Amino acid sequence: MLREIVYSSFALLMALVVLPGCRGPAAAPDSRLKVVATTTIVGDVVHQIGGEAIDLTVLLSPGSDPHSFSPAPQDVAAISDADVVFINGAGLEEFLTDLLENAGGEAELIDLSQDLALLKFAGAEHDEGAHEGEHDEGAHEGDEHEGEHHHEMDPHIWTSPRNVLIWTVSIELTLSRLDAVNAKTYQTNAAAYREELAALDAWIVEQIAQIPEARRVLLTDHLAFDYLAAHYGLEQLGAVVPGYSTAAQPSAQDIAALEDAIRAYAVPAIFVGSTVNPALSQRVAEDTGIQLVFLYTGSLTDPDGDAPSYLAYMRCNVNAIVAALK
């Protein structure tokens, strides 16, 4: 599967045409392409491709929850000065509309979700009407998801490296188009990073194979791992919070039904995001006698943490999942 994606990516790269208006040779360090990424995960992938050739600003700090992020004045300034802004999309960055309006500027906005097959998250009915009038940031003209509320589509697209591989194509093409003098650097970096993603994909397949089929079930604090589950043969049974956002709140009936399902399916663990208050999940774990396992969800860690890069983030999570379910 990943090999086919890689071949498709290479085909797109071969079709790259340098358009008029591309940046010329950089005369000084401060003339580097000014790039903004919203989350630490998007920022890391952009950095892997742009390297030192770009001036990169990441809006969210390590450990921040993208569902509850509030921009600061310096974030407005960064967007205002940027040449290009890379976003996760699919409705994750709910703060983005106001931020762009306040910042002004002429930055090109690149939605990394728009070339992906988005999943409709399983708890959409619980969130009905919660964001009435808002639409999927990832929708674009002619897209099959145009007009759907963004909260109906699962924005946790980074939880599968097969999606992130497609990100690399969009990032490489964009940087190469806007900064032609460094196009070769971007192409070389992207090709090397795709090899690492391919190795990660193969490793995940091997690790998941160690879990008995009957135990390949994920129960999480919120619906964050549908893409991982869909791509690697897991089943997301449910979540303590029946929605994609950590800001949602379950009813007493939701909790009771979840605890019944835990007992019926003999679920061994609840997986909880490291940026989320675990109190409610802890209560469910105590009620049902199962373990609480922490995963990284919407953010990387500081450089001295366990998950300072996307590759490390995925390996930490998969190791924790396999250890709990084997």
Image: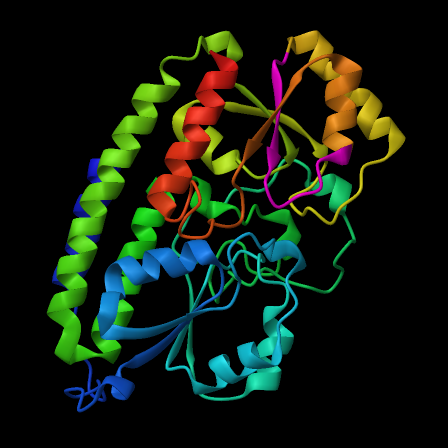
Q: Residue at x 26, y 66 (%)?
A: 50
Of 315 and 199, which appears nearest the observer? 315
Q: Nearer the viewer, residue 320 or 176?
A: 320
User: What's the magenta region?
Assistant: 267-279
Vertical arrangement, residue 23 with respect to residue 59, above or below = below
- Whether residue 18 is visible to the viewer of this picture, yes or no, is no
Question: In the displayed structure, does residue 263 sit left or right of residue 292?
Answer: right
Residue at x-position 26% and y-position 82%: 32
**Quadrant of the rendered structure where residue 34 is?**
bottom left
Determine the residue positioned at 18% across, 43% down: 195
Is 272 magenta? The answer is yes
Above/below status of 201 relative to 73: above
- Confirm whether the magenta stretch covers residue 25: no
Give 323 or 101, whichever is nearer the viewer: 323
Residue 131, by quadrant, is: bottom right
Res 250 seen here: yes
* Residue 82, picture quadrant: bottom left
Residue sitting at x 62%, y 72%: 71
